[in-house]
Amino acid sequence: MIKDMTLMQELAELDKKHFFHPTSPIKQQQEQGPDFIFTEGKGIHLHDVSGRRVIDGMSSLWNVNVGHGREDIGRVAMEQMSKLAFSSSFATFSNEPAIRLAAKLAQIAPGDLSATFFTSGGSEANDTAYKLTRHYWILKGQPSRKKIISRAKSYHGVAMGATSATGLKPFRDFTNSLSPDFCYAGNFSSQSLRDVIKAEGPETIAAFIAEPVQGAGGVHVAPANYFKEVRKICDEYGILFITDEVITGFGRTGKYFGIEHYGVVPDMMCFAKGVTSGYAQLGGVMLTEEIYQEFIELSTGTLLHGYTYSGHPMACAVALKNLEFIEQENLIENAEKMGLEMLKGFKWLQNERSIVGEVRGLGLMGGIEIVKNQNTQERFTTPVAPMIVSEAAKRGLICRSVTFDGQDTLVFSPPLIINKTEIDQMIEIIHDSIHALE
Ligand code: PLP
């Protein structure tokens, strides 16, 4: 089993000394070193330096939609890098992969979302959306419209604007100064959105942003009518509606984009992660035809917003190949079908194990609440989900716990290529991991 202990120890020591990990428990990381040092990925599995093989039940960071080890994507990256690794997209410069990807996105995006501003990831996409909406209102002669409303359990990333929009308070409390003009509505209450708009003054609100399904906040699925009501309220007060599809885009929920479940079209849409399935760093914001045209008509100077890697040729070529796989292999339909199987498995767990409370999901995003008492939904004083995550890792499954806001939740987001046998394996491991702690 232990393939190369010496290499593992060497890497673990170097990791502890030099690698400042993102979103990590710093002390624990320092004392214990990395739990896994991954070396390879194939399908839904990851392999580590000590020879272990685990199911990647989170698609790593909700992003490896087409699964690991796609050599064809690697080939496309190498061909593009050999031909043109990088060139600027600023001003009047362009490149073929970025042009073709923007056109492809216009074809698959909901409604008339038809123009794309590219970024390197989801946080940049969110910051871009806030800046573009604020600039839009300057162009429209309403500069007082600058506030962005988000929601209580939302996660929008870690750039300064994205952190400021993030409703989960621990992320905002991490730093002692945030961007101004962000406010928060209740999670799934359209009335709360209306109340915040009225309290702040509709003439001061630039946009409302929401994830179609909240991921990092614990996989929370909106009630059926919620986004229709949101769209109506935004229209009523002339507020732009932005969806953050960074997790929910590109098939994750069983539709190309999460908002399609709700039958409304946003004014802007942020994306990242699944656009390349993590094979390259890419994100962006899509605008409706109407808003894009308004930008063109009303702008007089230069659009002073752009990242060095906006429209990166290799990342865009990788995205095009990734989308080809999603479509050719019917991965969106598979996400819908396997999502139902996963939910069926969660319901079975609910009957089998007394600490499984509410279960929920949409497509291949799923959540399980851990409770002390199934009838009252009372929780344990110390969260149990993190312990289940450790037990699952020992048994060959990577999943995640969410303990924000007093939650005690397990979340799952396996690659869209997963099959029924592999879903059953996941469910069995979760079952055994819970059983081991009882
Ligand atoms: N928005 C949502 C909904 C996310 O889940 C994330 C990351 O998990 C982000 C934005 C930030 O994306 P990135 O980590 O690529 O900056």
Image: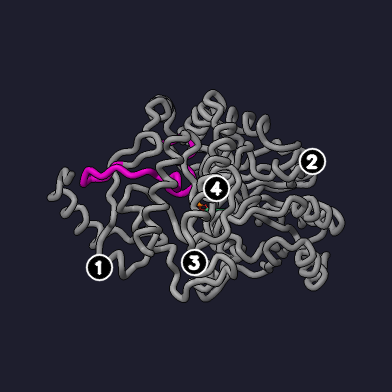
Mark 2 Cβ inside 8 Å of ligand 1: no
Pick whichever of labels 1 and 2 is earlier in the sequence: 1
Residue 426: % across, % down? 42, 45
**Which mark is nearer the camera, 1 or 3?**
3
User: Which residue is identified by label 3?
Assistant: 403
**Which mark is nearer the camera, 2 or 3?**
3
Distance from label 3 to label 4 (Cα)?
17 Å
Residue 147: % across, % down? 72, 65
Residue 425: % across, % down? 40, 42
User: Which residue is identified by label 1?
Assistant: 31
Q: Amino acid at mark 1?
A: Glu
- Asked whether residue 171 appears in the rendered view, the answer is no
Distance from label 1 to label 4 (Cα)?
32 Å
Q: Which residues are magenta?
A: 47-67
Q: Amino acid at mark 2?
A: Glu
Q: Amino acid at mark 4?
A: Met
User: Which residue is identified by label 4?
Assistant: 365
39 in relation to 224, above or below: above
Mark 3 Cβ inside 8 Å of ligand 1: no
**Label 1 CA crowd tier, 10 Å (few <14, some 14–19, many 20+):** few
Circle 2: element type: helix
Pick whichever of labels 2 and 4 is earlier in the sequence: 2
Dots 2 and 4: beta carbons under 8 Å? Answer: no
Pick whichever of labels 1 and 4 is earlier in the sequence: 1
Circle 4: element type: strand
Q: Tell which residue pokes out farthest to the right in this image.
A: 236
Q: Amino acid at mark 3?
A: Thr
Distance from label 1 to label 3 (Cα)?
22 Å
